[in-house]
Image (spheres, rainbow, N blue to C red):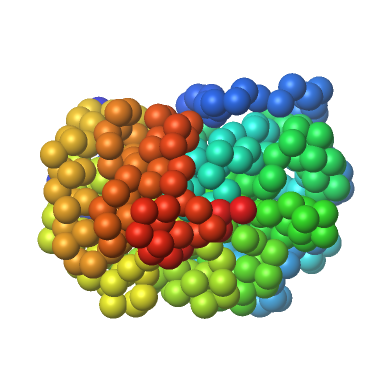
Amino acid sequence: MDNRKMTKREFLRYSFCGACGMALGFTFIDSIAGEIIRPVRSLSPVAPDKLWKWSKEASFYIQTPRGIKCLICPNECVITADKPSICQNREVFDNKLYTVAYGNPCAVHVDPIEKKPLNHFLPSSFSYSIATAGCNLKCLNCQNWSISQVSPRQTRNYDLMPQQVVEECIQNQCTSVSYTYSEPVTFYEYTFDTATKAKERGIRNVMVTAGYINEKPLRQLCRVIDAANVDLKSFSDEVYMMLNAGSLQPVLNTLKIMKEEGVWLEITNLVVPTWTDDLEMIRAMCQWLRQNGFQDTPLHFSRFQPQYQLPNLPPTSQSTLSKAREIAIAEGLHYVYIGNVPGDTSSNTFCPKCGKMLIERKGFTITRNDVVNSRCKHCSEVIPGVWK
């Protein structure tokens, strides 16, 4: 079998037979504004009996007879000296748990905030964006798999401690720091410490995440996070397991907790052909969002592009994305966007009351903004968001 070419049906069949594998490769993070150029540290061997500079004792773990149990995310890995975490950046040393993803991002960029995507948060601003290697999910359709599916020990990294991130953010005239590209849950301590220092300087913090995190660490993180885009990958527990190696309920819990904690929230749903393009599943997802008070939370239906383990699938059709958007609006969601389709007018913001266009976008650039003092310029309807 060519394991690079799988539909959902093929994947399920071959997984049952134990014949499905995954392969790693190398790609590059894209950036609209360009990468920040800094000296790059070359990797050098690190003795297994000593900590390296980019280590810090982890948060949220307990000792068990089988090893140290990490409590950051629902995987709750039991980790020993010769067995790291699923995310590949938590290791045991001297009977304590350490993160090896601290101050060593492998991606550093200045991005427009619209790239996250965040359409109702500080429009036209720029965000200093960082990521370390590692992820607690294993998505077959991962966009940044060359950094998410490896350890920080395997990537070429920047030496950028939390205070330095804040200084770089200020020097580059960014209004926020974004923890993004891979999964900030897996570099939790680096995210939390950096966000804390950023907040002390009046800088906002943005988390772009799959939302696969336990309640206690999430509530602590929400104290310093101002906005988040959460990737709600599907509304099926089976699909979550087979496509992403996770489960649905923890992500739904994350959405509720972030809303409760006052984090500005936007949601992305990547529509993957044969996997997450079932319109009735999309309807059920939109009904759940409406019933749980997310009617004013922007929802982004994003177009899938063939890559990583699913290169044979076609890009999501524009008609499917349009139908998904129509369903979401019919179910009572007020701000529904289509992403990854250049030129589609559904990337613009419309007033849910008078129907007039408020924000016009060309790619990640805003060419018109009629939101004035958080209201529609034309009918004075309140437009939820963080506008300044």
Q: Quadrant of residue 170?
A: top right
* Quarter where residue 204 is shown: bottom right
- Image position of 63 with respect to 301: above or below: below
Name the side, left or right, on which 330 lies relative to 249.
Answer: left
Please determine whether, in this image, residue 349 is positioned above or below residue 105: below
Give residue 282's position: percent from left, percent from top: 20, 59
Residue 1 lies, with reference to residue 178, above or below; the image says above
Q: Position of residue 278 (x, y in %)?
A: 15, 53
Residue at 61%, 53% (x, y): give it. 388
Compared across the picture, whether 104 is left or right of 335 comes to: right
Horizontal arrangement in the rendering, residue 232 relative to residue 27 (left or right): left
| Residue 197 % position (x, y) | 81, 56
The count of marks equals 0
Image point (66%, 54%), residue name: 205
Q: Residue shown at 84%/41% (left/top)?
A: 167
| Quarter of the figure with the N terminus | top left
Q: Nearer the viewer, residue 67 or 343?
A: 343
Which residue is painted at 19% across and 66% down in the image?
331
Among the 4 quarters of the image, the one containing residue 78? bottom right
Question: x%, y% of residue 304?
Answer: 30, 37
Residue 81 visible to an observer of this rendering: no
Q: Is 334 drawn above or below residue 365 in the view shown?
A: below
Work out whether residue 202 can be spotted. Answer: yes
